[in-house]
Image: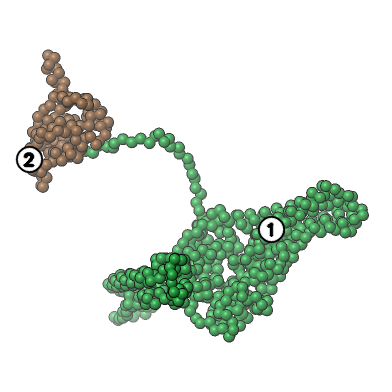
Amino acid sequence: MDNESQYSGYSYKSGHSRSSRKHRDRRDRHRSKSRDGSRGDKSVTIQAPGEPLLDNESTRGDERDDNWGETTTVVTGTSEHSISHDDITRITKDMEDSAHLDCSRHLGVSLAGALALLSFLTPLAFMLLPQLLWREDLEPCGTPCEGLFISVAFKLLILLLGSWALFFRRPKAFFPRVFVFRALLMVLVFLLVVSYWLFYGVRILDSRDRNYQGIVQYAVSLVDALLFVHYLAVVLLELRQLQPQFTLKAVRSTDGASRFYNVGHLSIQRAAVWILENYYHDFPVYNPALLNLPKSVLSKKMSGFKVYSLGEENTTNNSTGQSRAVIAAAARRRDNSHNEYYYEEAEHERRVRKRRARLVVAVEEAFTHIKRLQEEDQKNPREIMDPREAAQAIFASMARAMQKYLRTTKQQPYHTMESILQHLEFCITHDMTPKAFLERYLSAGPTIQYHKDRWLAKQWTLVSEEPVTNGLKDGVVFVLKRQDFSLVVSTKKIPFFKLSEEFVDPKSHKFVMRLQSETSV
Amino acid sequence: MSYVPGQPVTAVVQRIEIHKLRQGDNLILGFSIGGGIDQDPAQNPFSEDKTDKGIYVTRVTEGGPAEVAGLQIGDKIMQVNGWDMTMVTHDQARKRLTKRNEEVVRLLVTRQSLQKAVQQSMMS
């Protein structure tokens, strides 16, 4: 896909955008959502020559600006425009065209940026306009004004730093709907600035007020109000969600892996993003090969029963009666598939353990062949190796055991030889033991551990019965879908705890021998 | 029956000989004991002195060998077949009474009424 680029560049272009983050989010969302080259399926990507394979955000600087009109999405995926040189089959799975939304988002971003810039420059304008327009009439204003100037300067600086800290962050996700709080804040700022300008225009510009100190104080009050709005933004956007109020249970639909998370007050879409962030480092990687019961177990289910009707006339009841009879007969039939499943599992377990033992021994032995060069040792320069060569040298002895183990645990698609070599080199460089080297392979790690391009997918679909900007409530259920699997998330409210106090005097800990056993003889 | 540490214990005792009854695989005596140096003497309903950790008879089954031999509820057992029972744990007492190869146990028991009877006879 060519439309994977993150438009983080825009955010820095748009000045002191207090609330442009929301729009940046929305804009960037479709960038990242459209970057679904890595859906977890193993299809080959056909690239035009000279194009890097599934690259990440930063490398697409020039192309971004040309192609931005093509990239899209709303809730589900990229539009057809974004096909430039990839595998068509990957993109044509349930996509929607939403180019029109893109325009509105850009509009929104620029609007927010303009608003932010305006609100930043307004106090300066308030103070400068009288000086420019009717300088001669102004009363001279000494130390109080200078104090006010300094305070305005510093407050604006603080505002600038605060906005930078709060809003100038690379957005982590695209939300399908408007972020309500941000919209609210934008409206608030707009109203604030407009009302200040109104009063300024009427009271000061028209009447050419001569009291300069009053004008400067007016500007300072605007800056204070803006600072308070910033404080409100901090509380609404950052602090409110921190105190845990709900417990979310996320269950993966294909294999039942589940986790619990504590979150605060969030809207459904933000909670979805939170879950996704934690999904990538908590859940073991989705391995489609591990899902199915072995075929031998499932094969002989309902091998056909034939139903003979002995001279019955009415056919209306027959079909249901027949099917029920078949089902009942099948249920009563002695079913031994659980037996086979059990033995198959035991056998598989044994095989895995044997291969694992072989692997561990091979790796341990391989690691004994190299050691770090000490300064005192005098060695022939030809014998000194860098980590890569050292890794290659010892890889051969463990390659076979590793391959067999990975095959048995069905992990071999996740680890190419190159990746194993790289990991080995990494471990050798950092003086890790064989066990540390092996921890990556002996248990299935979280998705984020594997190579980014293959297993990380950025596009998820949020399915919810309630509008996604609603806050979380007890009992809300929503589903995060990908092509192969989905995460079902349900909400429960954390109960209200009643803590009561009980004082225990340390001197009251006394003990005696216990009881009377009574034994009959 | 109070116990002064370091001084020998003196008591008026009665000899009781119990023939064990065979019930299936077990030899039973027909009473229950309580007490012992590992038990809590304050909970003993039969003892006069609540620090007495001796072995007491807490129940006597009706018609059993113990009742026939004259054992009464509340008796303190001082000796069993020559073994002392004033300073034993509960489990040791049980073991001394339930030895499988002994068919007869000879107990020395004491009770308050014995003491009083002796005192009265001495005074009169």
Residue at horizontal 44%, vertical 66%? Answer: A376
Please state which amino acid type lies under the numbered disc 1: Leu
Alpha carbon distance from label 1 to label 2: 98 Å
Nearest to the observer: residue A368 or residue A71: A368
The residue to which callout 2 is attached is: B103
The C terminus of chain A lies in which quarter of the figure?
top left
- Taking the image as drawn, is residue A182 in sight? no
Q: Is residue A45 above or below residue A236?
A: below
Secondary structure under tag 2 reads: loop
Q: Where residue A59 sits in the image (x, y, percent)?
A: 61, 75
Q: Amino acid at mark 2?
A: Glu
Residue at far bottom of view: A49
Q: Residue furthest right?
A: A136
* Quarter occupied by the N terminus of chain A: bottom right
Chain under disc 1: A
| Residue shown at the point (57%, 55%) measured from the top left | A242
Chain A: its colour in the image is green
Residue with the mark numbered 1:
A161
**Chain hosting mark 2:** B
Q: Which chain is brown?
A: B
